[in-house]
Image: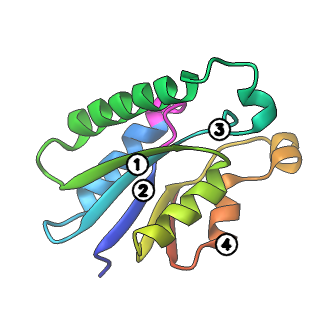
Amino acid sequence: MFNKILVPIDLQDLKGAQETLKSVKDYANGNMQIELLSVLPGYSMPLVASYFPKDMVKQALDAMRKELSKLAEDQLGDAVKYDVWVTAGKAARRIVKRAAEIDAELILIRAQKHGAIEHAMMGSVTAKVVETANCSVLVLK
């Protein structure tokens, strides 16, 4: 049984996020430490960031934290103990880094539904996490 679990949540896919949280609720017990993670893509790149006001990333992260907290509260309630973490950067890299920072024993991640062209051009976050994580990864379909 895993005790420290990192659960990446894609806030752009509300249905998938809700399904992921339902799986967390079904899987978790009171002894587990669960961290929900959402990643803001792109804004941490210097070229992209230079086009936005300096506090734009902070505002975006604050809004994401609020949205993720509300979604978790609605879906999990008091049934599961969890923490919320938001960050900016390349999703797969940030997920694997955060898992290492909290010594996660498991990453519970939803498979993304991209077409073949999109997958070939930008790769799959899920596939990159599976390939590079130093802990077990459970992929939800």
Give percent across and percent down for residue 96.
57, 65
Q: Name the residue under label 1.
A: 20
Give percent across and percent down for residue 99.
48, 67
Q: Quadrant of residue 88?
A: top right
Disc 2, disc 1: CB below 8 Å? yes
Q: Which amino acid does label 2 sit on?
A: Val
State the residue at coordinates (28%, 52%).
Answer: 83
User: Mark 1 or mark 3: which comes first in sequence?
Assistant: 1
Q: What residue type is labelled 3?
A: Pro
In the image, taking residue 61 as reference, residue 42 lies left or right, namely: right
Q: Tell me the CA gap for discs 4 and 2.
A: 16 Å
Vertically, is 32 above or below 83?
A: below
Question: Looking at the image, is mark 1 or mark 4 nearer the viewer?
Answer: 4
Figure label count: 4
State the residue at coordinates (64%, 56%).
Answer: 92
Q: Disc 1 on helix, strand or loop? A: helix
Q: Tell me the CA gap for discs 1 and 4.
A: 21 Å
Q: Residue 7 carries which label?
A: 2
Disc 4, disc 2: CB below 8 Å? no
Q: Disc 3 on helix, strand or loop? A: loop
Disc 1, disc 3: CB below 8 Å? no
- Residue furthest to the front in view is 54
Q: Mark 4 points at which residue?
A: 132
Q: Is the magenta stretch mostly helix, strand or loop?
A: loop
In the image, taking residue 69 as reference, residue 130 lies left or right, namely: right
Q: Name the residue under label 3.
A: 41
Q: Tell me the CA gap for discs 3 and 2.
A: 17 Å
Q: Tell me the CA gap for discs 2 and 1.
A: 8 Å
Question: Looking at the image, is mark 3 or mark 2 nearer the viewer?
Answer: 3
Q: Which amino acid does label 1 sit on?
A: Thr
